[in-house]
Each structure stands twice: as C-alpha cells, then as structure tokens.
Amino acid sequence: MRIFIYSIVVWIFQLFLLPISNAQNSLKLQNDSVTYNLNPYLKMLKDDSRSLSITQIQSPVFQNRFVSHPSFSLGFSQAGYWLRFTILSPPDKNWILSIHNPLLVHARLYIPQGDSGFQVQELGSQTTKLYSYKYPIFSIKPQSATPQTYYLYVWGDGPLDLPVLIESETFFQKKDHSEQFWQGIFYGILFVMAIYNFILYVFLRDLSYLYYVLYLILIAFFLLSLSGYGNEWLWSSPSWWSDRAVFITGNLTAIMIVIFCLQFLHLRKTLPTWYNVGRYFIIITLVEIILGAFLPDLSLNMLLLTITAAIFVIIILSISIKSYQKGNLSAGYLLLAWTVMLISVGIAVLNAFGLIPSNTFTLKSLQIGSVTDVILISLALVDRIHSIQMQKIQIEQEKNNAERNQKVKEEVLATMSHEIRTPLNAVIGFAKLLEKTNTTQTQSDYIRHIHESAENLLVLINDILDLSKINAGKVTFEQVEINLQECVRHLFETLQFQVTEKKLEMKADIQEDVPTLFLGDPVRLNQILLNLLSNAVKFTPKGSVTLRIRTLKLEKQQIALLFEVEDTGIGIPANRLSSIFEGFTQASDQTTRMYGGTGLGLAIVKQLVEMQGGNIAVKSHPGIGSVFSVALPFYRVYSVTEKNETVPASFPETPLVLLIIDDNPLNRLIAQSTVHNASSNAKAELAGSGQEGIELLKKTEYHAVLIDLQMPDMDGYEVARHIRTHLPDKQHIPLIAMTASLDDRDHEQALAAGMHDIVTKPFEAGVLFKKIFKLRANLQNPGN
Ligand code: ADP
C-alpha cells in the first residue's frame, strides 16, 4: 500500500515538474513511435507590441534575449511570443509538430530552408487553416541531417497554453485513429444515456430527466468544442461560432446543471432562498452569453467563462450540501459529482492562468471531471427511480389497506346494523301492538317512550349505514316515476303526529306549473324532504312549517325543482351556518341535550342532493326561523300510465290468506300480528323454516307468501328458486321477500332468485297489501 501511494506521489511530481527541467540545446528525433515533448527545448522571446519580424529576431541583440520558461502555460496575454527550438532528424522524414491547445488559433511556423531563409506555415482566424484539425498542427520535413533551428510565433485570445509535441507522421496518424475511436465511444455513451433518460422522462414525466438529457447534450457540445473535435468534425473553423463555441456551450451547460438541481432537489419547496440564488445565476449567465456573443475581444470571453464556472461550482456545491443536510439522500451523489467538478474546474482555471503547468492530466481535467459527473448524476437518477418505486409500492399498500379497512368497516356496519335492527324491529313491533291493547295511562306513556326511543335508534342506525354507503360510493339512484302529490301526502302523514302534538301549522305550497309526475328516485326524494321537514318540526316550538315547491327550469326533457322548507323556529346562529352540513355537527352544544339527534341528517341530505346534481342552501335568523332550499334536477314523463291512477285499495275486502316464512319466532309473531291487526279479513299462517314453508305451500292455496331472506339451512333465495322450479302450479302466487337489509344488492339478488317484490322490516300492512293486490293482478293477467 505504501509503495502504491509512493508511486502515485512520484508520478504526480513528475507530471508537474517535468516541463520545468532546464531547456536543452537540440532535440534529436530518432524513434518513429515516440511523442517527443518539445517544451524543454523551447526558448522564448516576448513580443509585447507584436511588431517584431523574423529578420529582426535573428539579429544577435534579440537572439540573446531568448530565455527558457518554466512551464509554457502563459495564461491570458495579449502579447506575441517567439519560440525557438532546434531539432536533429534523419533527412526526408515527415514529422508532425502540434500545439495541444484547441483554443489557440494564431500560430506561425518558420521552417528553415538551407540558405534561402524560411518557409512559413500559418494557422489562425485571419488566414485559412493548413490542416483542419482539433488543435494546431504543422507538417515538417527536415532536408538535412544537421541541426535545424525553427521559430514558432504565437498569439491568441484564450489561455496561452503551449504544450508543443512532435512525432512521426505515421505515429501521429495511428494515435489519432485510436483517439478518435475512444472519443466515438465516449460520445456514443453520452448519446445512449441521453436517449435512455429521455425515454424515462416520457414514462415518468419527471422534468429532472428531461433537464438531465439537455445537460448531456450541452456537455457533449461543450467537450466537443473544448477538445477541438467540434472544429474537426462538426463546424468549420475559423468562424464566429468556432471562436465562441466553448464560451457559449460552457455557460449553457452551467445553466442547465443549475436548472437540473433546482428541479431534482425540489429547491422551490425545500430551500427557497437557494432557489432564488439559482434563478439569479441563470439570468445573469444568460445576459453574459448575449454580451459575450458580440464582444470583439475573445480573451474576455474566456475570462468570463472561468469566473462563471467558479461561481457555478460554489452555488451547486452549497445547494447540494444544504439539501443533503435536509435529508435528501440523492443529493449525496450530486455532492460527489460537484466535488469532482470543483477539482477539475480548479485545475483548469489554475492552468488557464498559468499557475500550474500543462500536461495531459491538467489539459484534460475538464473532460475527466465531466465524465465522472455524468456517471454520478445518472447514479443519482437511478436512485430516484428506486425511491419513486418505493413510494409507489407504499402508496399501493396504503390504498390496499384503506380498501380492506373500508370493506371490513362496511361489513361490520352492515352486520351490526342488521343484528341491531332485527331485535329493534321486535321492540317497535311489540310496542305498536301493546299500544293497541288496554293499558293504563302510565303504561301507555311508557310504551310510547319505548316506541319513540326505538324509532330514534332505528333512524340513527339507518343514518350511519347510509353515510357509510355514500362514503363508499355505493349509492345508486333510480329513475322511476315519482308522484309528487303522493309524495307530499306521505310526508305530511308521517309528520302528522308530531305536528299535532306541538300544535304547529303545516302547509304545502306547490306552484301550479310543477308537474305531478316526473322521473327520479322517490325514496331518496322522500328521505331528503323528510329530513328537512322533521328538522323544521323539531326545531320549531310554535308557529308553522311550510313546504314550498316551484319549478326552476322546465325543458322538453328535463325539469329542475326548488323545494323550500321554511319554519318559524329557533333558527341557526350565523357562525354555525356553514358547518351544519358536516357530519356530527349541530348548531349549538345544547342541541343534543334539548332536541336529541346526531348531526348526521343534513350531512346525508347534502350528499344525496349533490350526488343527484343538485344543491342545497340555508338561510336562517336566530329566533325568527330558517329556510332550507334544495334544487334538484329530474326527467320529465309524457305518457301518464293508467296503473298509477288505479292502484287497488290498500286493505282487503275479501279474505286474504298469507304464508309467512321466518326462522325468528319474534319476527314471525310481529309480522303475523301486523297483518291481523290491520284487517279482520287478513290472516297469516306461519312457517319456521324454508322446508316447512314449502310443505305448507304444497298443501294450501295462499294469496301470497312472505319469505325472510336470511335463514339457516335454506335461505329465502333458495326457497324462491325452489318454488319457481319445482312448483309449477304456484307460479301465480306473489313471493315477497322480507328483509332488514337496505342494501340494493340484496334486493336485486332477491328479484333474481324469483321473488316478485320486497318489503323491508318492519313493514306497514297497508303497503304490503297494496303490493299483493298489484302483483296478483299482474300475475293473473300477464298481458297487463
Ligand atoms: P340532527 O338533527 O340529528 O342534530 P342534522 O344534521 O339534521 O342533525 O342537523 C344538524 C344541526 O343543524 C341540528 O342539530 C340543528 O342544530 C341545526 N338545524 C337543522 N335544521 C334546523 C332548523 N330547521 N332550525 C334550526 N336548526 C336546525
């Protein structure tokens, strides 16, 4: 290990110190496959005013002023430099003399021609290039085997780096081919990475990838310009562009990297101050590019570019360090990349100012740095894909969990409400039956309280179930005929008891042009209006409750109706108005104590209204009253069907015998009592299981069969299917499902199993009879 470190130190030492060794007299060219470094053999004469001629400098006065120079990295200078060197070579051999500085565009070589003076080869912007190559080259062919003294005259706008090399033409070509090959591979890799990241951008739509692609393109152009391959491969030199390509592409690359950092590290959100610093840098650099494009003095361009590069490195280093400290781990890769860039730019800058000598490493430091950066940044981007994937997986998992939880919640709610509703129905059913028996005043008061409490509990359970269905997006709306008159009558009947008890006045005000029949969901409309009306009744101690209905829009196919529920009650404080539509919210903390309720009703109403494309609003003055307005769209009906007009009477006038199949003895009893109490003509027989029911049905002729859906062994669906397939002579008997479930899917399933209709428990006898009459009429005259 120590030997390894030692050899690196020696290598660096040699690398930097080699050119400083004392200039020797003449370079002996012998070997065909060696690159000779001419720098130790160079003597230099500075020509500050760029006015000396070849004849002048050959005079002894000037000859004595030629001195060696430690590095031949002269930094930026406006002066001209005469370089003298002597070489010794076998005659008639072709050598290539090259100055490894693509930015140097003015060079003139004086080749000795025996006694007849010098042949001049000239490169530079003012004249045509002799060889179109990435850096200046000259071809020389010594004519005699004696030492020959050459003069090279250079001046320039960029940094005057003068690593002068000489090698045989064959060796030069061989080296050039291999270098072209490696350069091709390097730019090929940049190209492939650009394509790859562009595809990533198309799929991920993350701007970081697009900026990285642009950065790759710009850095490729920058390196092409810097290495001289741009001149050789892409554009002709000299030209306006070739003189400024390094300056422009270098600055654009810096801008692109800053844009990339701003996006990649989410600086706008995480570090707003640095985000602004980055933006100012971009703007200033753009201005600099525009200025530099028209400056006649190109040396200023190179100076500006170097300063920009230094500021740029400071900015991106600070940004990455801050981001890393804030916990952005991929900033670590960028930090590494910028450190490498800092070192390489530092070396390039020091070299440009002549502070460190030129050699392969110092001259190529920007290229080496850029390649390392490209690799490190792509690692950062790969890291990003990884973290995006992790995020996606996490989101997916969270979604699955949420869905599972939602499902479990729904199942628990559905089961619970079913389980609670069954005994609650028994309580309500028996309370109703008890109310009709002979009781003392106290007893009937108790019974009424039991009845009311049970009804309230039922409302609460239905509300919770409704809300969970709405939240799960499981609510669908029917489009069937709604008879507005009937609907209003039913609402008023329902509230009649409370209204009379509170001595309130209840009015309906329906505008004349409101159609009586239209299409919509009658159950939901009833639910909405009942909620608003019962609130109005509940919160109105004296005065009146009015339901007003008018048309908002009357078109060929659609109508929009406005329902207003106005009361003269306690009203709602202004600051609570906006929140009463939220779940579990009441207008005042005393509401529950004084009036009961859960604060769920209006939340459900609002959702139901909005899901149908309507809207709800409220106006209220405490102590004066409230107006709730609901606007709802409906479809129009044209042909009024006869059916509605001839609904048969609700109670049987001739004997009606029903079969009730239910496994729960309490439920059986309630159903039977409900039927018996409703009419002396009606009679219900009972079966405790599906099997028993089928046996009874085979023997006796019933007018209708009521079947509970949830039963052990043979459930209601099976009973229906059995009757449909195995008892052909019973097809005219209506099969009616009884269920405590409010789920539409259960209803659909029941109809699919062959039931004709459904009643929800606890059922009203009148409703049941109505259904039975209608069904019997239809089943016996299937044509109707
Ligand atoms: P609940 O009636 O079960 O408390 P709602 O969601 O139906 O729940 O109503 C929320 C609250 O809005 C009520 O508690 C009451 O404070 C207020 N509110 C609703 N309607 C009226 C009304 N007509 N008059 C006064 N306050 C009302």
Image: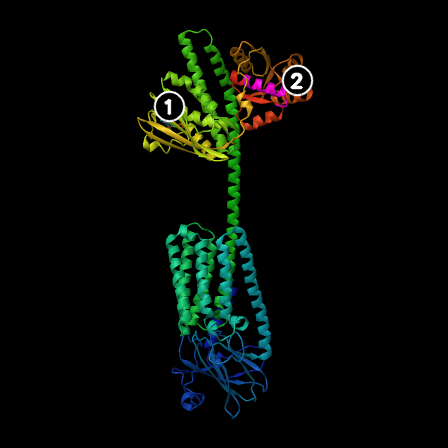
Which residue is rendered at x = 44% and y = 24% of the image? 530
Of residue 291 and residue 401, the one placed in the foreground of this image is 291
Q: Is residue 599 visible?
A: no
Distance, label 2 to label 1, CA atoms, is 50 Å
Q: Are marks 2 and 1 in contact (CB under 8 Å)?
A: no
Three-letter amino acid code of the residue under disc 2: Lys
Q: Quadrant of the C terminus?
A: top right
| Residue that sits furthest to the left in the current view | 623
Q: Taking 481 as reference, is 626 left or right?
A: left
| Residue that sits furthest to the bottom in the current view | 115
Of residue 288 and residue 783, the one placed in the foreground of this image is 783
Of residue 205 and residue 459, the one placed in the foreground of this image is 459
Q: Judge whether 337 appears above or below 348 on screen.
A: above
**Disc 1 target residue:** 545
Total marks shown come to 2
Q: Position of residue 200 (x, y in %)?
A: 54, 54
State which region is magenta: 769-784
Q: Mark 1 or mark 2, which is nearer the start of the sequence? A: 1
Q: Judge whether 221 appears above or below 461 on screen.
A: below
Dot 1 lies on which element? strand
Q: Position of residue 714 (x, y in %)?
A: 63, 20
**Disc 2 target residue:** 730
Which residue is rendered at x = 41% and y = 17% of the image? 497
Circle nearer the viewer, 2 or 1: 1
Q: Is residue 46 visible?
A: yes
Which residue is rendered at x = 39% and y = 61% of the image? 283
Dot 2 lies on which element? helix
Colouring style: rainbow
Of residue 570 and residue 196, the one placed in the foreground of this image is 570
Write down which quadrant ligand 1 falls in.
Answer: top left
